[in-house]
Image: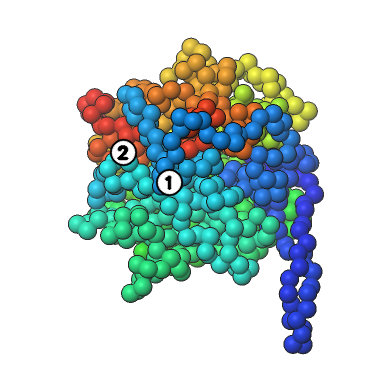
Amino acid sequence: MRLQRIGVGVLALVLVMGITDGTITSQPIVPQTNLALEHAIRMALGQGGPTLHQQMLSGGVVQTGLHARFGEGALPGAVRTATLPSSLPADVVIHTLGCPNVLTGQFNNIRVNQDCSFRRQAEEMIAVDPSDPTHLIAGQNDSRIGYNKCGIDYSFDQGQHWADQLPPFYQFTLNDGHTADAASDPMVAFDSPRSTGSNVYFGCVVFDVVAAANGIVVAKSNAAFGGTFFHTPAPGPTQRFSTTPLGVVASDNDPAIFNDKPFMAADAGLSSPKRDNVYVTWTRFRMSPDGSTVFESPIYFSQSTNGGATFSLGVEITGTSNQCVLGNLFDPKEGAHECNFDQGSWPVVGPDGTLYVFFNNSNTPTLVAQHMMVKCRGTVDCRNKANWTGPYKIADDFDTQPFSEQIAGCGPARQCLPPNGYRVDDFGAGAFDPTGGDGGRLYFSWSDFRNAGHCASDSSGLPAEPCADHNNDVWITSSSDGGQTWSSPRLVSNDDKTGAAQWQSWMAVGPDGIVYVAYYDRQYGCEPSGCNDITLAASTDHGQTFTHFRLTTASMPNLTNVTNPVEAGFIGDYMSVAANASGAYVVWADTRPYAGTTPEEDVYYVFFPRSTVGKVKEND
């Protein structure tokens, strides 16, 4: 997703109270909105023309900005021909606390979020306690109290039952002096196992929809709480009662800066020299002074060595490479070979403390992007930019899905696969396999359009409808030399007959070397209608071959402005998979109704037992 739109921004006029010479006066001021968010909103509105090579702001952030301006269910350009029911059917029972739902099948599909409203939950993440495989924490973008927040979910019985809560992030005071009104892009991680259990960390982007300030903050839940309460990471006698101060990864009031799409990892290695360090990587968008152009969007890194209480100053880690070009395309002060058009970083910690960070990069001469990786050894200080090596190219990303203005929910300059209006993102996930090769094997999985049929071109030469087919596929590659070289991409998805789309994949590897890759899948009779399922592909031979399992008990209906105008157009930028010796844990955004017949977006979960797949084969 590499196009941005250029247009005219909108500023709000407000009245504030000022004091001059001891006299209280009412003064009009024009607040400085965030240029990156305004730019992304203009792009969604179709104002201006496309600009190649620029990455896109997080979908959750943009959706929040649109809702703030136009109201839920009133996004611009949509044809609203239906409304949500004013009352529930007579046979629907709503509980006062918690609205669980279980769709039974070979793999039970269990509703994670427990709110009883018809508000969107999407863009989910899951982590498993290394001290207890039955203890899970999940998170998602959560709109139950208006706009977008981040919600937290927890389970103590391997996901058979869930409870949830809203985090304290909206109490955080931004650098402009008031509290954030929105949050997006949840991240969650457990630290190392111990007899008393593992601590868990949860964080999000926090921002204002009509002001410049934004940041990334982290809360902590000590092992004794198990995620039932998230408190300040700052140690002290009142920690168990207080939600502030939060751990601050980044905080800016510069209108040209937006900190976006963070992901988190904690070093859970018992023998690691950096045991219990907490790491966050994210995309730092920097705009031109007039807000018309994304100058750059490199990946940044920060760490905490004191349980999330404080984080180090962020450093840019994506570096330079001959594989990257046009680094100075928009800002001549940058180097030509800077790898600075990035998005979707994913950090992975090896057992020796080495940190690997995977990301999508568009410093390429064509529409075809590339996946890359940088790393910082466990024996060096990762706060020093010079201690990061790479970037190493993993594979090409055929980011050539069609751009279309004809799909409800898919705005101009966004890539979607008709008939869905859901955003397509090619950035993927990496994982470490301690059983493979000398010192372990790395994997990376993603989805792209390389196998799809030919598409038409628009006036700018970009791919557009109609396309011969929409055969998006899922891929995997591996490295046995620490990420310096990678194998040729191998197909993960198994639909060779209908040319159906598989997209938005995520992966994890168990301690026994089993590779798990999950993704949205339209092969089960959904390619014409746009419904979706979730498939899990499991490999016992280091990604050489896969066995495929349909996790969903029935297909999810396409969420459109006709079927649900409040929630249409966004299913998140990613799903999530975690794995341990017990099996795989998968969460996704599901549009099946839990009450009545109206499609409604919630987070669902499947536990995939390790015993479902066969014996792990010898190392190759």
Image coordinates for residue 619, horizontal then vertical, percent: 25, 31
Image quadrant where one finds the C terminus: top left
Image coordinates for residue 533, horizontal then vertical, percent: 46, 25
Name the residue at 62% across, 23% down: 419
Which label number is shown at residue 160? 2
Task: Give the label, 1 or 2, closer to the camera.
Answer: 1
Q: Is residue 302 left or right of residue 239?
A: right
Name the residue at 29% across, 27% down: 541
Secondary element under disc 2, as helix, strand or loop, is loop
Q: What residue is shown with label 1?
A: 96
**Whether residue 263 is situated above or below residue 276 in the rendered picture:** above
Which label number is shown at residue 138? none
Name the residue at 56% across, 26% down: 558
Q: Is residue 250 left or right of residue 201?
A: right
Image coordinates for residue 464, horizontal then vertical, percent: 69, 25
Q: Quadrant of residue 483?
A: top left
The type of residue carrying mark 1 is Thr
Image quadrant where one finds the N terminus: top right
The type of residue carrying mark 2 is Gln
Q: Nearer the viewer, residue 7 or 230?
A: 230
Name the residue at 50% across, 16% down: 525
Q: Nearer the viewer, residue 202 or 482?
A: 202
Q: Is residue 38 in sight in this rendering?
A: yes
